[in-house]
Image (cartoon, rainbow, N blue to C red):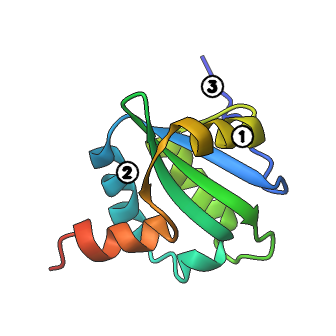
Amino acid sequence: MKFKRKKVNTETEELVYRFNSFDDFCNFTNYINNANIKSINLASKSIILYKYKGLYYLVFSHINPDYKYNKKLFSLLTEFSTYQNNPELFSRKLCECGEVIIKNNAIKICQKYFIKKL
């Protein structure tokens, strides 16, 4: 049985990914760090981490289509998280009802403060 990975349109204004726990998010940022994906803040204008109903949501706003590592980044995201359908609508709900955990550059900040340096 073959499974086909859902293709996500990175040309959209916003993308939202759901993590089951903060640890899952930290594991993702650690993997990104080890995968040598550079200048992660250039991937999008804004990268915010929210908590809503016990789950964590990473919101990318104004995706940069020219970012060198887009394909690798969004491929890795699907390994650690789940794509949220209707991202524009859901990100508005997060703004209204969710708790902001990391206001901007969420990946970079998590790498700085929560990833163990060897």
* Residue labelled with disc 1: 87
Residue 35 shows in this picture = no
Q: Residue at x 26, y 72 (%)?
A: 113
The reply, left or right, for residue 15 in relation to residue 29 is: right
- Give percent across and percent down for residue 19: 43, 40
Q: Tell me the residue at 70%/31% (across/down).
A: 85
- Type of residue at label 1? Pro
Q: Is residue 42 above or below residue 114?
A: below
Seen in the picture, residue 47 relative to 55 is either above or below; the reply is below
Residue holding disc 2: 25
Label tally: 3
Q: Nearer the viewer, mark 1 or mark 3?
A: 1
Callout 2 amino acid: Phe
Kindly state the secondary structure of the residue where label 2 is placed: helix
In this view of the protein, which residue sits in the foreground, 48 or 1?
48
Viewer-proximal residue among 71 and 98 = 98
User: Considering only vertical position in the picture, is 50 above or below 44?
Assistant: above
Quarter placement of the C terminus: bottom left
Residues 102 and 78: in front is 102
Front residue of this view, candidates 104 and 19 = 104
User: Residue 3: which disc?
Assistant: 3
- Crowding at dot 1, Cα within 10 Å, few <14 / some 14-19 / many 20+, comes out as some
Quote the CA–CA distance across marks 2 and 3: 24 Å
Quadrant including the N terminus:
top right
